[in-house]
Image (cartoon, rainbow, N blue to C red):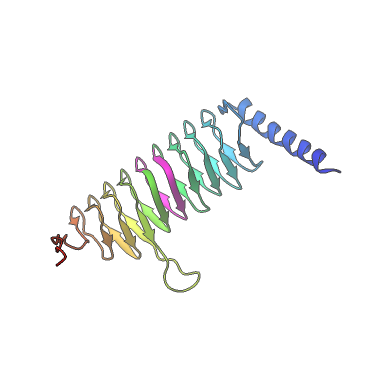
């Protein structure tokens, strides 16, 4: 079998899978770049937009909208808004009514109902509670210093994480905690507490040359 014949058969199989999901009530308004493997489960009422790739044991809940998302062995709950340009790696579990936005990567983490991670963030080996608000540019530093060892981060319900934060695992943020923009959080933050972990700004006047 030549390459052209193989590509033709692959394309036909792809179209058959998409047709089966459409017949069950999944909306796929445009097939451009959409790849769904046979083992993926999608509930009726979900919307799959162009550029979305769903692999392995991934499941998608009813009412979820995926736009240019790559997901492998991930669980996406009902009524989630995910994308564009989102990467959900194995072990990701998204609850209901989430917003996961531009350029977000999540790996081996559980994200609670109603949480918003809108843009430019990496979440790895973590458990986020309900209604957490994540500012732009969060990085979860999960490497434990030993190959293969990753520490966990826990974020309680209703927590607000400021822009450009790093959470250095293992660390726990209690329910209702706040972190200031630009903070590097290395210690636990109690519930309903504001954490500020950044150097004080110092302005120095420019010295004139002699």
Q: x, y percentage for residue 54? A: 58, 42
Q: From this viewpoint, is residue 14 visible?
A: yes
Magenta span has 83? no
Residue pushed farthest right? Answer: 1
Q: Percent position (x, y) of residue 21?
A: 62, 31
Would you say residue 95 is visible in this rendering?
A: no
Horizontally, residue 21 falls left or right of residue 116, namely right
Residue 103 painted magenta: yes
Residue 166 picture location, percent across and down: 32, 58
The image shows residue 137 at horizontal and vertical percentages of 34, 50
Quadrant where the C terminus is found in the figure: bottom left
Q: Main secondary structure of the magenta part?
A: strand
Magenta extent: 98-117
Instruction: Kindly indicate the quadrant of the structure image that contains residue 141.
Output: bottom left
Q: As drawn, which residue projects farthest toward the front?
A: 210
Q: Is residue 80 above or below residue 197?
A: above
Residue found 47% across the figure and 30% down from its top:
63
Identified at 37% across, 58% down, the residue is 140
């Amino acid at each position: 079998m030549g390459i052209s014949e193989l590509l033709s058969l692959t394309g036909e199989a792809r179209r058959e899978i998409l047709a089966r999901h459409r017949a069950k009530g999944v909306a796929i308004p445009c097939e451009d770049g959409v790849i769904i493997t046979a083992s993926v489960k999608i509930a009726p009422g979900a919307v799959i937009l162009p550029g979305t790739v769903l692999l392995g044991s991934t499941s998608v809940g009813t009412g979820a909208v995926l736009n240019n998302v790559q997901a492998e062995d991930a669980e996406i709950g009902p009524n989630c808004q995910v994308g564009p340009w989102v990467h959900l790696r194995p072990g990701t579990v998204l609850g209901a009514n989430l917003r996961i936005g531009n350029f977000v990567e999540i790996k081996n983490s559980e994200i609670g109902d109603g949480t918003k991670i809108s843009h430019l963030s990496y979440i790895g080996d973590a458990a986020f509670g309900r209604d957490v608000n994540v500012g732009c540019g969060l990085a979860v530093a999960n490497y434990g210093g030993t190959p293969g060892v990753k520490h966990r981060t826990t974020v309680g319900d209703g927590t607000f994480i400021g822009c450009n934060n790093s959470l250095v695992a293992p660390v726990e943020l209690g329910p209702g905690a706040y972190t200031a923009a630009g903070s590097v959080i290395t210690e636990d933050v109690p519930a309903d507490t504001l954490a500020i972990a950044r150097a004080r700004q110092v302005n120095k006047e420019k010295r004139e040359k002699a």
